Amino acid sequence: MKQQKIFLGSNIKFLRNQKNKSQEDLATILEMSRGKLNSYENGIRSNMPNEDLVTVADYFKISIDALLKHDLSKIGEYKLKQLQSGNDVFITGSKLRILATTVDSNNVENIEVVPIKAKAGYAMGFFDPAYIESLPKFQLPIITSRERKYRLFQIEGDSMLPIPDKSYVLAEYLENWNDIKDEYAYIILTKNDGIVFKLAFNQIKKKRNLVLRSLNPQYKDYEVNISEVQEVWKFVSYISNQLPEGGLTKERIANILQEVQSAVVQIRKM
């Protein structure tokens, strides 16, 4: 069995620098000697006593599991802030939706692109950092917030007309599904249907489900149990190479007037 790499020392150093603390400052806070802290950070000591592990984890608001097993310097500021704000299964005891993500050389979140041809793969590998790393990615200068996570999904079909087939939908990751707003558009990843783009109606508290609706009235509403949902992304904008359909033409207006006049004549005869 492959041995699990331990990131304890590098994570302590990374988190200490995040808080702008010197080794001496942190050692005083944790009530340990500077030499002892230095030996942990530099891997001279690898077996930290449980009481010290708990103290370090509590101070940085990071679970012991994350502190040991994950390179926190590689997960990006968005994910780190989520963990430190309490969205960590080992701290809150709740089910954690782990978002696999990528960052650039400056540790800024990328916007990954999920084209139509990648939809099936995304449904199977959305949680796999290696798969997410393989997706096309870019930065968007007009999006400067480090507090949010964005992804670009290509949609297909006519269920969300007037948003055209093959458009790219820019969406923001939604951590708390209770924040889903009625009649707002979302990219939703489900176990059975994969990626869908729909208006949502939030019935989580009452019925443990979402009602999903298309903009195109030819499609019927349907319900999805919340246990089937795997990711939710809030609609921000869309990109398309098609112009939206224009208004009524003169010819169409003339035809409508003619139909109205004919109807009036028929009513008068009656």
Image: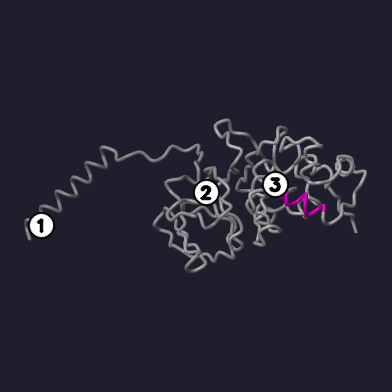
Are the residues at dot 2 and dot 1 in contact (C-beta closer than 8 Å)? no
Magenta-colored span: 52-62
- Residues 266 and 82: in front is 82
Residue contact at pointers 1 and 3, CB within 8 angstroms = no
Q: What crowding class fits label 1: few (fewer than 14 Cα within 10 Å), some (14-19), or many (20 or more)? A: few
Amino acid type at circle 3 is Ile
Q: Which disc is residue 185 wearing?
A: none
Q: Nearer the viewer, residue 195 or 224?
A: 224
**Which one is earlier in the sequence, the residue at label 2 or at label 1?**
2
**Residue at the disc numbered 1:** 267
17 drawn magenta: no
Write the residue at 21% across / 41% down.
Answer: 254
Q: Residue at x 66, y 52 (%)?
A: 122
Q: Position of residue 165 (x, y in %)?
A: 50, 46
Q: Which callout, 1 or 3, points to the residue nearer the camera?
A: 3
Residue 201: image location, x then y, percent: 45, 59
Looking at the image, tell me whether mark 1 or mark 3 is earlier in sequence order: 3
**What is the quadrant of the C terminus in the image?**
bottom left
Q: Is residue 60 magenta?
A: yes
Mark toward the viewer: 2 or 3: 2
Residue annotated with mark 3:
132
According to the picture, the residue beneath numbered tag 2 turns out to be: 234
Q: Where does the image place residue 135, in percent across and percent down from the top left?
A: 68, 43
Say which residue appears at 22% left-offset and 46% top-offset: 256
> Which color scheme is applied?
one colour
